[in-house]
Image (tube, rainbow, N blue to C red):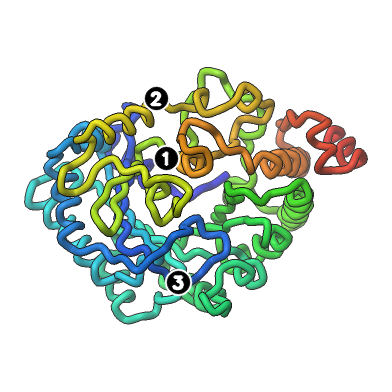
């Protein structure tokens, strides 16, 4: 399946001497505010406020990243990460667009002044709700940094799906504003990423949502189910049926999956996982260093107070004054994260799951639910099973239609499947 080139892949292509060494293009995050102009029902940031990052805090964070002082050299450096992605989040990041512009100016200038290796290998990244896109100061920023910017507007597919969750505090919908922003950016010839969040409240709209994204001109569509509690078996049945509709649409309209990407469909997933593959799914075990508006440092943004609320203590590992891993507590937390992998987080049943390949989780959400990042939350389990069954349906029909000598095995146990689909449907899948 064709997917837009990721920045780390671009680094490997442009700097082949760095390829093959297993090095990361690491992400560092600035939470410029925890305020937002929307009140999305599924948002993981359950404890938003009105904080704003002072520019002096941002400068100190950048200076530590570049100087590698106060413990930073052991946590992130150009040898570990020859490329760097600087991500800006909120709340809604465009609420602080002038601050973001200041930070970008300072970061780029400091890289040049110090002749830092990142000076030719950096990218800024912003995902916005699109509400403020047409503000003149936002437009100035986007044009100024367009050659160093990965930008996307979150659109949850069609209007019904989007507006079922992504609303203003007074309940007013936001779809029209978001889609106008996305269309304008794409009309100027720029790539627009996508991010469809599937939740219990909107899963019934999935087919219409994906079709609508295709109609808007998207050839790469990223969609995922939320990790949080709330999923039931009935939602898995709905997901399967919605994905079956999507499959039939793609097949009937002769989509070439070498030229179109939809993250719900993955040929290499939904089978047993190699026991030697212990890699963590996400960067929540410490490779997405994040700074909140007050200058506290976290392994990733999901460990912040704005995400955890009152569920757990914020998982701080430093701050811009003392540095990173400079206290016994902070050192202990980082050492704990370094020891976490797929085996330590998973039960025996989860580790040996016959469809473990491609099953995702969030280490920081594990911490939020259980008080430790080393225990895996599996609320998404039934949705992964449904997705596996839908992939068996799609790929085997696709291979047959295209004359491709390939076959996707159905590794979903029968008793699991029959909790989601009918016996007739199960027999049909196995006959493909």
10 Å crowding of disc 3: few (<14), some (14-19), many (20+) = many
Mark number, residue 284? 1
- Report how far apart the C-alphas of labels 2 and 3 lie in the structure: 39 Å
- Residue 278: x %, y % from top left: 49, 24
Mark number, residue 307? none
Residue drawn at x 38%, y 31% as measured from the top left? 337
Q: Nearer the viewer, mark 2 or mark 3?
A: 2
Work out whether 226 lies above or below 18: below
Residue drawn at x 56%, y 55% as measured from the top left? 221
**Which secondary structure, mark 3?**
loop
Q: Between 421 and 363, which is closer to the camera in this rendering?
A: 363
Q: Which quadrant is home to the C terminus?
A: top right
Mark number, residue 339? 2
- Residue 140: x %, y % from top left: 28, 75
**Which secondary structure, mark 1?**
loop
Residue drawn at x 40%, y 75% as measured from the top left? 133
- Residue 19: x %, y % from top left: 32, 31
**Which secondary structure, mark 2?**
helix
Q: Between 375 and 86, which is closer to the camera in this rendering?
A: 375
Residue under circle 3? 130
Q: Between 193 and 290, which is closer to the camera in this rendering?
A: 290
Work out whether 359 lies above or below 259: above
Q: Nearer the viewer, mark 3 or mark 1?
A: 1
């Amino acid at each position: 399946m064709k997917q837009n080139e990721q920045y780390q892949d671009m680094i490997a292509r442009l700097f082949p001497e760095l390829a093959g060494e297993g090095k990361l293009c690491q992400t560092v995050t600035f939470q410029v505010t925890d305020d937002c102009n929307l009140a999305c029902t599924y948002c993981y940031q359950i404890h938003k406020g009105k904080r704003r990052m002072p520019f002096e805090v941002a400068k100190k964070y950048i200076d530590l990243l570049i100087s590698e002082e106060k413990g930073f050299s052991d946590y992130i450096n150009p040898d570990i990460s020859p490329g760097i992605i600087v991500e800006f989040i909120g709340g809604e990041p465009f609420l602080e667009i002038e601050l973001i512009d200041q930070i970008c100016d300072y970061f780029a200038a400091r890289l040049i002044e110090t002749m830092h290796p990142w000076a030719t290998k950096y990218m800024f990244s912003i995902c916005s709700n699109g509400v403020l896109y047409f503000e003149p100061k936002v437009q100035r920023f986007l044009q100024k940094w367009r050659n160093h910017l990965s930008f996307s507007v979150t659109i949850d597919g069609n209007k019904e799906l989007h507006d079922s969750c992504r609303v203003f505090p007074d309940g007013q919908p936001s779809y029209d504003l978001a889609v106008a922003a996305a269309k304008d950016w794409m009309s100027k010839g720029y790539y627009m990423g996508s991010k469809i969040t599937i939740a219990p409240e909107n899963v019934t709209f999935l087919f219409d949502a994906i079709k609508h994204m295709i109609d808007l001109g998207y050839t790469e569509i990223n969609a995922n189910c939320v990790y949080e509690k709330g999923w039931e078996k009935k939602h898995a049945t709905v997901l399967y049926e919605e994905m079956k509709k999507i499959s039939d649409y793609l097949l009937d309209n002769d989509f070439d999956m070498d030229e179109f990407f939809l993250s719900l469909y993955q040929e290499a997933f939904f089978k047993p996982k190699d026991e030697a593959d212990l890699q963590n799914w996400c960067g929540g075990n410490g490779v997405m260093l994040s700074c909140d508006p007050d200058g506290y440092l976290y392994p990733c943004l999901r460990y912040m107070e704005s995400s955890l609320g009152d569920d757990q203590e914020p998982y701080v590992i430093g701050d811009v004054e003392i540095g990173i891993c400079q206290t016994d507590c902070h050192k202990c937390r980082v050492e704990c994260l370094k020891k976490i992998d797929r085996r330590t987080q998973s039960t025996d049943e989860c580790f040996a799951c016959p469809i473990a390949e491609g099953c995702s989780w969030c280490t920081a959400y594990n911490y939020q639910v259980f008080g430790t990042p080393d225990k895996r939350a599996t609320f998404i389990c039934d949705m992964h099973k449904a997705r596996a069954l839908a992939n068996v349906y799609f790929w085997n029909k696709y291979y047959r239609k295209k004359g491709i000598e390939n076959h996707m095995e159905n590794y979903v146990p029968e008793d699991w499947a029959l909790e989601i689909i009918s016996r007739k449907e199960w027999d049909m899948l196995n006959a493909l």
